[in-house]
Amino acid sequence: MHDFDYFAPTQLSKAVALLAEYGERAKPFAGGTDLIDQVRLRKLLPDVIVDLKKIEELNTFEITSEELRLGAAVSCDRISRRAEVRCRFSALDDSCRLIGSIQIQNRASVGGNVCNSSPAGDTNPALICLGATCHLVGPAGTRTVPIVSFFNGPGKNVLSPQELLFEFRIPTPPDHSGSAYQRFIPRNEMDIAVVGVGASVRLDESGARFVSGRIALGAVAPTPLAVEDATELMMDSPVNDDTISKIVEVTKETATPIDDLRGTKEFRKQITAVLAKRVLRQAIERAKSNETKSNR
Amino acid sequence: MTRKRIIEFHLNGSPQEVLCEPRQTLLEILRDILQYTGTKEGCNNGNCGACTVLFNGKPVVSCLVFGVEANGAEIETIEGVAEKDGLAPLQRAFLEEAALQCGICTPGFIMSAKALLKENPSPTEDEIRFYLAGNLCRCTGYDKIVRAVQETAKSVTRS
């Protein structure tokens, strides 16, 4: 394998200093499930690898009534073991349970999945539909970027070579809210999404009306997408087949997929519609069962 | 090179001290430096699970771990599975159920299955298949492997 030096700082400031010093010659490293393979294939040839896993800020994992604070290096396995994530941030939990194998989930982090910026990354639609923000740090200090604005293209994002993503913040959804993420793959497990769809909804107390909601898509455009028209349609509208059909229709229209070895344009469009309906129904069901729980 | 460094970790309970380069994977350290060749190299890109070891009790693919990351860790490989007086129940079940043919995937399957049974002593067939989805076998068709894990779960629950 390509030769490099390795640092595992315990202070965030030290990691920032290393990235400032080495710039593009350095690569931040968390679970390594993408990075090690890319170095082995010589797609990346870093002189320095900065392991972030020993830094406290990258391991934050706190849930309050206001928000989930998730350190960028927290593994998918740790996330899917928290019952509050399962219950309140279900789409994120769904995506963390789908990434790779158990072996991969024990290593891979959401921060790494986002920074790898694959259009098909499973956590991206989940984070978008849950309204996550990315917290970045660099030599000039910290800045915040909404997840939907983080991606620039396949493998590309807003991070400068001297910056790193250290934390996500996701607002804790109020009662009567639910979310879900599903993807289509030709195998049962262990594959890359042909299409991935995330949905979050907030219902009124009766469960008969949407208060608000979001739909997000993966693998159907150069970057993960938010379906703006769906957000519009879910503003104070009845929960019925008519609204759902309209949401599915605009979701399908938002998808601009390409033909590749995983599927054709037409197939991806069709699957987008099928998954949109399924995740929406699942998010609604979860919103109703969350309502039951909070009434107990 | 000055980049070489000494790492210390526990391998199957015994302390190890290894001089390695940052670019060497845990798989290379186990096989090439320590001669623990029970852990197999399959795809070398994280897909096949042949190189699965337990890292602080959790199954990981050792081809996607740098050796330097193992500093201070507890690593368990297939060489640490057998008991003093012979094979562990899981290993015996693999033999009895004929859950292997060529054998390359077997150490990885045993490590994953061991972690599964520790976490979930009575898994359903679906749970077994889901948990072992990261271990590929091109010989058995999986049914015999699933049966071996089911039999181990039964025998351990009985005893």
Image (cartoon, coloured by chain):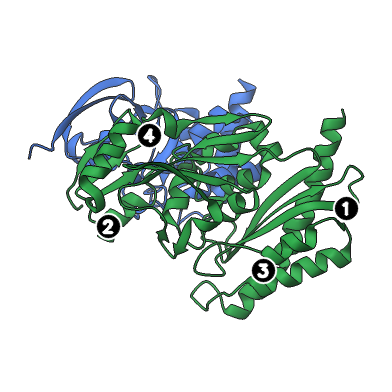
Quarter of the figure with the N terminus of chain B:
top left
| Mark number, residue A272 | 3
Q: Please, what secondary structure does the residue beneath circle 3 have?
A: helix
Q: Amino acid at mark 4?
A: Lys
CA distance separating discs 3 and 2: 32 Å
Q: Quadrant of residue B91?
A: top left
Q: Which residue is mark 1?
A: A209
Report x, y in % for residue A92. Answer: 61, 45
Report x, y in % for residue B119. Answer: 56, 29
Judge by depth and name the residue closer to the eye, A163 or B138: A163
Q: Tell which chain the image draws in green.
A: A
CA distance separating discs 3 and 4: 36 Å
Quarter of the figure with the C terminus of chain B:
top right
**Is any part of residue A136 visible from this angle?**
yes
Q: Which residue is mark 2?
A: A44
Cβ atoms at labels 3 and 2 below 8 Å apart: no
Is the residue at mark 2 from the same chain as the one at mark 4? yes
CA distance separating discs 1 and 3: 24 Å
Q: Which residue is mark 4?
A: A53
Q: Nearer the viewer, mark 1 or mark 2?
A: 1
Q: Is residue B144 left or right of residue A292?
A: left
Report x, y in % for residue A217. Answer: 61, 62
Q: Check disc 1: other Cα within 10 Å, few if <14, some if 14-19, many if 20+.
A: some
Q: Please, what secondary structure does the residue beneath circle 4 have?
A: loop
Q: Tell which chain the image draws in blue.
A: B
The chain to which mark 3 is attached is A
